[in-house]
């Protein structure tokens, strides 16, 4: 099995790279990418611990980007650190920090005090994102679950939503290509785009040098997977597959449990030196 999308505690995942590598080994994964949000801090540990488990490690990233008024996530797979990548990460991290403080201020305005400080004290993560705030709001009993934290406080248009000037989709694609990586549109069905808009996004992405899209991402229905497979084929994009795993116990999702890619897809890992054995 192959999993090309997951998060460690260096962004908003719960586990260390070591714990992820152990879990990956328990699930008999052959290949695992770490794709933290706007961060490559987990790469070194992940390389070490996957090697110890005999798992092939794919260094990755999940960039937050803007396209029109939408927040779009662009994965970079099998990239190498370079000056362009480090410069883009510095910009994104500064915006994340500024946004985290603004979210804390907005929450304070509606009577939720010291949220930023509480997130920093609880999470050793070097970045505080919306999922950290969502966990805090659940812990404080203000919402029942993380999803409600987004629908009531943190999602677009809600009281603690901060529109952020992320880099553009085309800029993320250029940086990933400069770093020798493969740009992939993450979870295409999670943006609330109409079919027409999604195709427009994918065409823009491809013209900018984009190469693939997630056909299988987290928990999807089989008709959704088929629709994404058809779209990838029609637009001649490579197909990727990832769990978007953030931690044990958060949902019934685990590392590397995705259903196989439909036939007719061109798997993104065909670009790499990976044996075509087993499922996926
Ligand atoms: P951020 O990158 O800090 O804006 O946080 C977005 C992250 O929050 C996503 O990567 C998911 O891990 C998580 N998340 C969970 N539910 C939602 C939701 N309904 N809307 C947006 N993000 C969500
Ligand atoms: Mn996340
Ligand atoms: Mn995402
Ligand atoms: Mn993700």
Image (cartoon, rainbow, N blue to C red):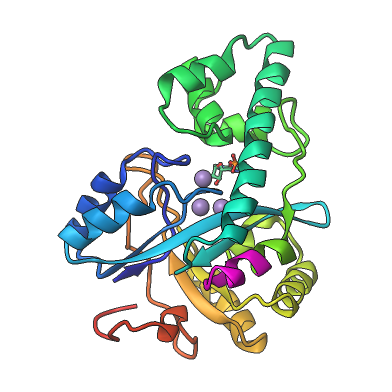
Hey, which residue is sitting farthest right in the picture?
68
Image coords of residue 101 (percent x, y): 66, 23
Q: Is residue 3 at all visible to an observer of this figure?
A: yes
Q: Look at the image and tell me in which quarter the C terminus lies.
A: bottom left
State left or right for residue 67 relative to residue 268.
right
Q: Look at the image and tell me in which quarter the N terminus lies.
A: bottom left
Image coords of residue 99 (percent x, y): 68, 32
Front residue of 113/62: it is 62
- State yes or no: residue 6 in magenta: no
The total number of labels drawn is 0
Image coords of residue 113 (percent x, y): 61, 9
What span is in magenta? 174-184
> Residue, x 72% and y 53% (percent of image)?
167
- State yes or no: residue 177 in magenta: yes
State left or right for residue 33 relative to residue 224.
left
State left or right for residue 155 relative to residue 5.
right
Front residue of 223/34: it is 34
> Residue, x 27% and y 85% (percent of image)?
275
Whether residue 5 is situated above or below residue 274 in the rendered picture = above
Front residue of 176/262: it is 176
Whether residue 1 is situated above or below residue 46 in the rendered picture = below
Front residue of 68/16: it is 16
State left or right for residue 8 relative to residue 179.
left
Hey, which residue is sitting farthest bottom in the picture?
264
């Amino acid at each position: 099995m192959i999993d090309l999308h997951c998060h460690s505690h260096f962004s908003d995942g719960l586990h260390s790279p070591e714990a992820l590598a152990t879990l990956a080994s328990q699930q008999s994964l052959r290949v695992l990418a770490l794709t933290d949000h706007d961060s490559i801090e987990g790469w070194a540990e992940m390389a070490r611990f996957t090697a110890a488990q005999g798992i092939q490690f794919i260094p990755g990233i999940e960039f937050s980007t803007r396209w029109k008024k939408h927040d779009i996530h662009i994965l970079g797979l099998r990239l190498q650190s370079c000056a362009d990548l480090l410069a883009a990460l510095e910009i994104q991290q500064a915006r994340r920090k500024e946004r985290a403080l603004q979210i804390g201020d907005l929450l304070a305005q509606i009577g939720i005090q010291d949220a930023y400080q509480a997130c920093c004290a609880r999470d050793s993560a070097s970045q505080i994102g919306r999922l950290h705030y969502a966990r805090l709001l659940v812990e404080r009993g203000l919402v029942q679950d993380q999803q409600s934290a987004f629908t009531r406080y943190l999602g677009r248009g809600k009281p603690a939503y901060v529109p952020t000037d992320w880099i553009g989709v085309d800029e993320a694609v250029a940086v990933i290509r400069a770093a020798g990586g493969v740009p992939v549109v993450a979870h295409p069905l999670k943006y609330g785009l109409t079919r027409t808009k999604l195709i427009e996004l994918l065409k823009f992405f491809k013209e900018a040098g984009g190469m693939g899209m997630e056909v299988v991402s987290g928990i999807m229905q089989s008709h959704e997977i088929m629709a994404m497979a058809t779209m990838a084929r029609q637009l001649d994009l490579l197909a990727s597959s990832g769990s978007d795993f953030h931690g044990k116990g958060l949902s019934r999702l685990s590392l590397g449990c995705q259903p196989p890619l439909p036939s007719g897809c061109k798997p993104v890992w065909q670009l790499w030196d990976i044996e075509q054995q087993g499922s996926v």
